[in-house]
């Protein structure tokens, strides 16, 4: 069998050589260990010896976060009010570190720092570098940037000026994403899109979804303007959809044949699905009362998601006619194996019993008692 | 490198650097990605030599692959915690090398993570001792290197 040239088989037999065998590990393993550490720790190993100083740091995950200027990541108070000189210190540090770390196609590249529009030229430079190196995973987390600045605008112009965008996973927090039909095709390889606290119109989302047909995961968290979410695209490959709105959502209408997982956490007025023949897992954490009544919602799921296996349901059951086990109106869940309920309100228990009788394959049942 | 051995029922023979032969099921051997392509072409009489793996390490690897619970993540966590708990730093390093060489499913992550946890927030001296790294810097060189990356030493206990 082929022997890896970076290994010396004889070193294993001599216990006197046990010293410093770690330095002789293939660089890939050392760098793999680094991925479990903050890059500050990785940098410190440069002081171990000449071998370590000159080691090329080909890490698969590069995260530039406030720790590179020694600000604690959990200290939200400090993070909310980083003074300008420290923000420039961060920029300088990232520029230095980009001389040390290699970005390539397989690198997941993250900038996590409260930076808004006023730092556009610096952020653009980093994004440009990542896109130029054919980076596939880009994560721009500018949490708290909007406290004292306008959000950074995702630079479609960089995607347009490069030969090709290789981006497969894009995650944006407190950025602005303004896609137009002319530029959005540059994101056509995208498989995963996560938007956190990104202001957008329903039409923006529509533009993205109509172009990104390879999208398998879509996460919309605290996206404020999104009061209506309608996705009817029979061609798309979306498998997982997670929606956690910041404010009340008037309407969610879905018809996505490939969708396997849907998670919603928030307040909602109308939830309609159709032709969801692959939907296996649904988690609904509904705040307040569902105006159309939970019976309607369960009926919707039962009829339009015939393969549903796992259902998590937290909701209020006040306005709900009680189900009895002999009631033929109770929707049937023929494939449900796992059910977790947090029923609130007077009729929650009736409903739980009702579903039990109508789920012949149920294996796991968890009922969490909730106060109020 | 493959030798012929007496045929036995449907198991793969692995020979360690210290000459011990282990018979494992194809299901176990297939989780060692480095030898996976060799398994396809081998019959029950083939012996696959592992030049970078000692018997102790292969024993541990097989123990891991056979013992890892299939189901609940919490059970896996408990099993993995127990698995690494009893390893000395020397054993840990040796095993990391063996596991990295064989590319053992799941175990590469576990070993790398374990080593990472052990050196996290530790001083340069500690990490040198732990890895057995020989310091070949002159004091002046080391001071210069520390100076270049001074920010990275902020908040670390020096000895």
Image: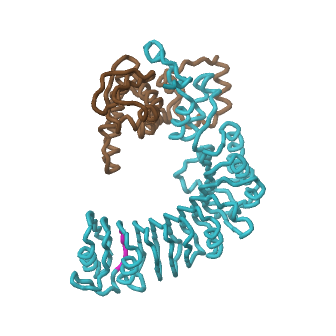
Q: Is residue A361 magenta?
A: no
Q: Nearer the viewer, residue A83 or A268?
A: A268
Horizontal and vertical percent position of residue B11: 31, 32
Q: Is residue A97 left or right of residue B77?
A: right
| Quarter occupied by residue A170 | bottom right
Horizontal and vertical percent position of residue B70: 32, 47
Residue under the point 30% across and 47% down: B75
Q: Is residue B125 above or below residue B150?
A: above
Q: Is residue A247 visible?
A: yes
Q: Is residue A103 above or below residue A295?
A: above
| Quarter occupied by residue A199 | bottom right
Residue under the point 58% across and 25% down: A48
Q: Is residue A354 left or right of residue B29?
A: left
Horizontal and vertical percent position of residue A161: 78, 56
According to the rendering, which colour does chain B have?
Answer: brown
Chain letter corresponding to the colour cyan: A
In the picture as drawn, the residue positioned furthest to the left comes out as A326
Q: Is residue B110 visible?
A: no
Which region shows up in magenta?
A311-316
Residue under the point 32% across and 69% down: A335
Q: Is residue A371 left or right of residue A256?
A: left
| Quarter occupied by residue A174 | bottom right
């Amino acid at each position: 069998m082929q022997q890896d040239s970076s290994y010396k088989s004889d070193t294993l037999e001599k216990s006197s050589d046990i010293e410093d065998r770690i330095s002789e590990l293939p660089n890939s393993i050392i760098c793999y260990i680094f991925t479990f550490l903050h890059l500050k720790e990785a940098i410190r190993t440069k002081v171990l010896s000449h071998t370590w100083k000159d080691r090329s740091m080909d890490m698969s995950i590069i995260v530039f976060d406030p720790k590179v200027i020694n600000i604690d990541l959990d200290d939200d108070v400090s993070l909310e009010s980083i003074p300008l000189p420290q923000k420039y210190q961060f920029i300088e540090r990232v520029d230095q570190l980009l001389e040390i770390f290699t970005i390539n196609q397989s690198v997941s590249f993250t900038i996590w720092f409260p930076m808004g529009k006023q730092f556009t030229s610096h952020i653009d430079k980093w994004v440009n570098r990542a896109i130029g190196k054919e980076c596939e995973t880009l994560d721009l987390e500018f949490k708290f940037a909007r406290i004292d600045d306008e959000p950074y605008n995702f630079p479609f112009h960089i995607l347009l000026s490069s030969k090709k965008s290789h981006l497969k996973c894009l995650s944006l927090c407190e950025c602005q994403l303004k896609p137009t039909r002319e530029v959005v095709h540059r994101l056509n390889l995208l498989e995963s899109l996560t938007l956190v606290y990104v202001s957008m119109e329903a039409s923006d989302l529509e533009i993205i979804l109509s172009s990104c047909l390879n999208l398998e995961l879509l996460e919309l968290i605290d996206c404020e303007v999104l009061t209506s979410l309608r996705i009817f695209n029979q061609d798309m490959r979306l498998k997982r959809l997670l929606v956690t709105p910041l404010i009340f959502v008037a309407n969610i209408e879905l018809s996505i044949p490939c969708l396997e997982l849907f998670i919603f956490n928030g307040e909602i007025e109308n939830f309609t699905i159709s032709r969801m023949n692959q939907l296996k897992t649904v988690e609904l954490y509904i705040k307040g009362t569902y105006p159309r009544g939970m019976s309607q919602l369960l009926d919707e799921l039962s009829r339009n998601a015939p393969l549903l296996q796992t259902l998590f349901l937290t909701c209020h059951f006040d306005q709900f006619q009680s189900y009895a086990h002999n009631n033929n109106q109770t929707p049937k869940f023929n494939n449900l194996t796992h059910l977790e309920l947090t029923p609130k309100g007077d009729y929650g228990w009736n409903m739980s019993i009702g579903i039990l009788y109508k789920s012949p394959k149920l294996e796991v049942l968890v009922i969490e008692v909730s106060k109020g | 490198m493959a030798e012929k051995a007496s045929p036995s029922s449907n198991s793969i023979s692995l020979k360690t650097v210290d000459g011990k032969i282990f018979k494992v099921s194809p299901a176990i051997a297939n989780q060692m990605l480095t030898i996976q392509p060799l398994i396809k072409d081998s019959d029950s009489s083939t012996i696959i030599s592992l030049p970078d793996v000692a018997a102790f390490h292969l024993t541990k690897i097989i123990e891991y692959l056979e013992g890892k619970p299939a189901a609940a993540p919490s059970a896996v966590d408990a099993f993995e915690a127990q698995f690494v708990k009893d390893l000395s730093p020397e054993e840990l390093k040796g095993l990391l090398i063996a596991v990295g060489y064989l590319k053992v499913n799941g175990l590469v992550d576990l070993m790398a993570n374990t080593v990472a946890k052990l050196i996290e927030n530790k001083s340069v001296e500690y990490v040198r001792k732990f890895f057995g790294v020989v310091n070949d810097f002159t004091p002046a060189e080391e001071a210069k290197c520390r100076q270049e990356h001074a920010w990275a030493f902020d908040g670390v206990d020096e000895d």
